[in-house]
Image (tube, rainbow, N blue to C red):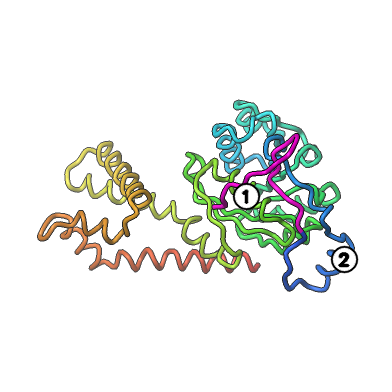
Amino acid sequence: MYGEKKQTSTRHHFCAHSQPPVAGRPSSEHIRKIKERKFSMTTIVPIPCDSYKLGFIGAGKMAESIARGVVKSGLLPASQIRTAHLGNARRTAFESFGVKVLDHNSQVVEDSDVVIFSVKPQVVKGVVMELRSLLSEKQLLVSVVAGVKLKDLQEWAGHSRFIRVMPNTPAAVGNAASVISLGAAATKDDGELISKLFGAIGKVWTADEKHFDAITGLSGSGPAYIFLAIEALADGGVAAGLPRDLALGLASQTVLGAASMAVNTGKHPGQLKDDVASPGGTTIAGIHELEKAGFRGILMNAVVAASKRSRELSNN
């Protein structure tokens, strides 16, 4: 995660300093667009940390989780967050914690400094293209859309001050694992702003976009693997004679506690496993059965298979 930086300003605490775009190996078309837009020190407008307006294009569960986390953490007041939706259920969900709900996406863009695209992958191109004429280099654009690459997002938007974020579903309970990757014209301080924003719903890492398919296979799909493990542990408890409710409660809390130890103790998971497995005891007997069934290999294969599928989908 990005570290804290002290800024000086007479009016606002700014998250960004003017920086030129990051050099890369763009296509001739991209070079032409860069030359036409003439990105410069004056183009990248700093975004004030304490007063920027946050807009969501897409008012689904992920957008709601992010907005709720931001408000709950005190990072931004609800009055500085907006989205658009015509359905009563989604409007009510956002309005229940103070977020302004507008009728049209264009209104969100016109009234936001940071715009987060949180729509389905199959519609994101049309949504971005529809709003293209309203999108400005003064705005920081963010995508949480799975499988859609920065180069495409930047092309559709007409500029490259874009950041891609891969959160996962535990965002709903403030325990997301999110990874961010910066687009060509996004500054380091833009990255810090988004790191703090997604830090309100969990933990944040940064990585090169080339790793995003593997990240999808691990943390994106990973919660489903753990839910399956919890269900299986509970079924084992029932098979051993426990009441269903007790078995499910014990399985869920056991996984939560084990994950907390892995995160907070600083010990390698192998060491934590060894600490539980006494010689000739119950735990090593259970581990022996898991090893005979190829438990670790199965989980590894699941991550690799999901990563491969993510790569296939993103290439289509």
201 or 188, which is in the foreground?
Answer: 188
Q: Amino acid at mark 1?
A: Glu
Which comes before the other along the chain, label 2 or label 1? Answer: 2
Q: Where does residue 158 sit, x and y in percent of width and height?
A: 81, 58
Disc 1, SS: helix
Q: Residue at x 26, y 56 (%)?
A: 272
Task: Please tell me how many numbered marks the rendered image carries.
Answer: 2
In the image, is 8 to the left or to the right of 272?
right
Q: Residue at x 85, y 64 (%)?
A: 33
Q: Nearer the viewer, mark 2 or mark 1?
A: 1
264 or 303, which is in the foreground?
Answer: 264
Q: Residue at x 83, y 53 (%)?
A: 43
Q: Assign the C terminus to one quadrant of the image.
A: bottom right
Report the Cα–Cα distance between label 2 and label 1: 27 Å
Q: Residue at x 29, y 39 (%)?
A: 249
Magenta span dominant secondary structure: loop
Q: Amino acid at mark 2?
A: Lys
Q: Which residues are magenta?
A: 1-19
Q: Where does residue 285 sit, x and y in percent of width and height?
A: 15, 60
In the image, is 81 to the left or to the right of 236?
right
Residue where numbered disc 1 is placed: 192
265 or 126, which is in the foreground?
Answer: 265
Q: Where does residue 261 sit, x and y in percent of width and height?
A: 32, 49
What's the mark number on residue 35? 2
Queried whether the magenta region covers residue 59, the answer comes back as no
